[in-house]
Image: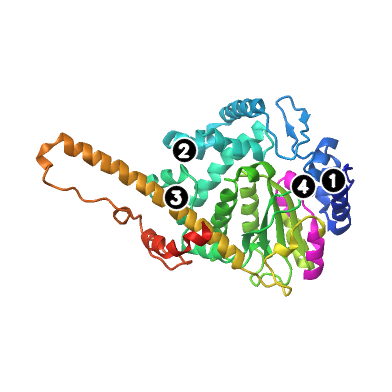
Amino acid sequence: MQKMTSTSPQTNSLVQSILQLCGVVQRAVLEYGESPVHEQQEVWNDLTGEESSRWAVNNSKGAVNMYGTNDPYEPVDLVVTSLCDFDEELEAIPVRQKKALVRVLDRTPSYAQDPLFRLKFLRAEKFDAKLAALRFVRHFEEKLQLFQKNDERATDEIMGREITLDDLNEDDFETLEGGYLQVLTQPDCGNRKVLFYYRACSDCYKDRENLLRSFWYVANKLSQEEEVQKRGIANVVYNVGGFPEHGMDYEKSRRIALLFRAIPVRMTTFFPCVDDVAWVTVVETFSVLISRFLRIRLRVITGNHEEVMAKLQAVGIPSRAMPVTASSALLLDDHLDWLENLLVQEIEGKREEMDQEIEGRKEDQDQEMSDDKDIEDNDPPELTVESMDPEPRKWTLYGANTLQDLVHSTSSHYSAVG
């Protein structure tokens, strides 16, 4: 596969390392060779994380604009024009293909019409409005499939907002806690977040949907960061130290590949690490399931643990942040700290919402009391967080049965985490 040249010595070194240390699936070689030169350059910009030129976006005329800046740069006119084009592309999609989106637009329009929310999808597709609109439609179709409730009202409520930890059931949360899917504590050479998958996320869930909902939560949580929207996410799959006891769930792999095309963030690189021929077959199968965009950015790293770690470091992945031991055992401390931070943030956010609702209800009560002198001597019941506690659920991280219990159980962590 032909390398692209760069004026940066660091980038040229990364290119050489990728060429020498990584393998490529045959189909990707052919697809890369058939790609125009500017697209080949974009592939290498993503693989190396080169800051000087990878903020290339297609404008409405199809030309490529290169911005030689250290930070992601988006001209205001590009954003405005792209949002208008996005609306037109959505309108052009037949209703039968966007039933979930139509439902959300009908019942909670403010969520799906939020320009900042739509901008996520444009950034994920480098401002290609047509591709962004298709990703947007797939987003709601997949979300409905994963989180649909028996109650229509509950389904409408969850479809019209972001997913939180409280939307995951016990088995989902247990899968998430297991750490087979983690966010590394350090970014890659392009200052991008790195998603880590342990042994292809196999043998870590009771039901396939547990993993899919966990992945949805993590990916969409990351997409709330503007830098992640602009820079994208690097992916490392650590398939070293043994094959899954119960074999490979290829349907899980197919569903994950579909979610890649539905989440509002771009997957920029994909590094599967393997030490056995059985894993090579898994990687080749997965490469057929993912999009062409990601397939030509997939590079296979082979070897034992020590060799894999050295190669990852050479291609720009912070191997010291990899949550595995020298014997390929999984580490969880950093992951559980990350989860705890998210948990506290969501609790504090819920408390703020409750406080605002309580204040609004008290104002309504005061108004009613002033309008009706007959109830002057009757004090209304005081509204508290306890009286508004949502439906109980189990939190395996703390063993709390209700949100109120969870608030109390995490209060001691606020100063350390906040």
Given residues 248 and 260, the one toward you in this image is 260
Label of residue 104 in the image: 2
The residue at the point 57 percent across, 38 percent down is 137
At 12% from the left edge and 42% from the top edge, which residue is drawn?
A: 376
- The crowding category of the residue bearing disc 3, from other C-alpha atoms within 10 Å (few below 14, some 14 to 19, many at least 20), is few
Of circles 1 and 3, the one toward us is: 3
Q: Which mark is residue 154?
A: none
In whole angstroms, how far apart are the C-alphas of marks 2 and 1? 40 Å
Query: In this rendering, does residue 97 appear at all?
Result: no
Q: Position of residue 63 (x, y in %)?
A: 77, 27
Which span of residues is magenta-colored?
287-313
Name the residue nearer the viewer: 231 or 150: 231
Q: For residue 10: magenta?
A: no
State which mark lies toward you, 3 or 2: 3
The amino acid marked with disc number 2 is Val
Residue under label 3: 349
Gap in angstroms between the C-alphas marked 1 and 3:
49 Å
Q: Residue at x 75, y 64 (%)?
A: 279
Give the foreground label among 1 and 4: 4
Q: Position of residue 127 (x, y in %)?
A: 67, 33
Using the numbered discs, state the Cα–Cα distance from disc 3 to disc 2 in whole angstroms. 23 Å
Judged from the image, the secondary structure of the residue bearing numbered disc 1 is helix
18 left or right of 402 in image: right
Q: Position of residue 339 (x, y in %)?
A: 54, 60
